[in-house]
Amino acid sequence: MPPVLPTNRRADLRPRTNAVRTWQPASLSYPAWTTIDGLAPVVQAVIDRPGWTPGNALALLVESDASNLANNDYLDFYAIDYSPTLAPRLHIGYLPPAACSPVALADLVAAAAQWGWTSTTPGFDARFDRDHDQDIDVADLTRLAQMWSDGECL
C-alpha cells in the first residue's frame, strides 16, 4: 500500500513543532555520512503531537543559517526512491524502563527504622530519602506510605 502523502509535499511548509536541535558540523565533505546526535527531543515533540500513532511517517527539516550559506556549506539529502544507498537514515536507540519494584510493607518498616538517619549514617538507604534532603524524616515516611498505598515503585 503506498503512503498517504500530504497535500503540500514541501516539508518546509508543513506544520512544525517548537523543537529545535542546533548543530554545527566540524566540516562537510562529499560523499560522506554526517551524524547529527541529540535529535531525541525533536523526535519526541513529533510523536507527542495529537493524532500521531506508531507506524506514521516522520519528517525532519534541516535548515542552514545565513552564516553557513556565506561559507557555501550545505548538505544534500536524497529520497529513498532516488537512491536507497544515499537516503538519510534515522537510528533510534531505546532502553525500556527498569523493572518496577513496588513499595512493600517491609520497605516502610525498614525506612521507619532509619528515622532520623542522615546520608552519613552507615547503612543509610537513599531510596527512602524521597525529598532528597539527605535524611530520613516524616516527609519521607509520609511519601513512602502514600507510594505503598498507591502501588507505586520504589
Image (cartoon, rainbow, N blue to C red):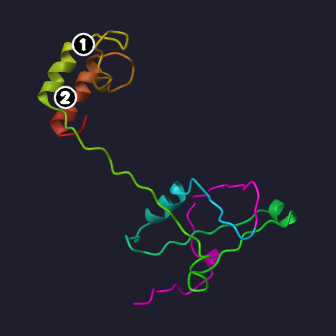
Q: Residue furthest left?
A: 105
Q: Which label is found at residue 115?
A: 1
Q: Which label is found at residue 86?
A: none
Q: Residue at x 68, y 55 (%)?
A: 23
Quick one: label 2 or label 1, which is nearer the N terminus? 1
Q: From the image, tell me which residue sits under label 2.
A: 145
Residue 27: quadrant of the picture: bottom right
C-alpha distance separating marks 2 and 1: 14 Å
- 99 is higher (above) or lower (below) than 69: above
Frontmost residue, 61 versus 137: 61
Q: Is residue 30 magenta?
A: no
Q: Position of residue 107 (x, y in %)?
A: 18, 26
- 85 is higher (above) or lower (below) than 135: below
Three-letter amino acid code at the position of disc 1: Trp
Secondary structure character of the magenta stretch overall? loop
Three-letter amino acid code at the position of disc 2: Ala
- 87 is higher (above) or lower (below) than 119: below
Q: Residue at x 44, y 90 (%)?
A: 2
Q: Residue at x 47, y 75 (%)?
A: 57
Frontmost residue, 127 versus 15: 127
Over which residues does the magenta segment extend?
A: 1-29
Q: Secondary structure at mark 1?
A: loop
Q: Is residue 16 magenta?
A: yes
Q: Position of residue 18 (x, y in %)?
A: 58, 60
Task: Tell me the crowding category of disc 1: few under 14, some 14 to 19, or many 20 or more residues within 10 angstroms, Cα based.
Answer: some
Q: Residue furthest right?
A: 70
Q: Position of residue 141 (x, y in %)?
A: 23, 22
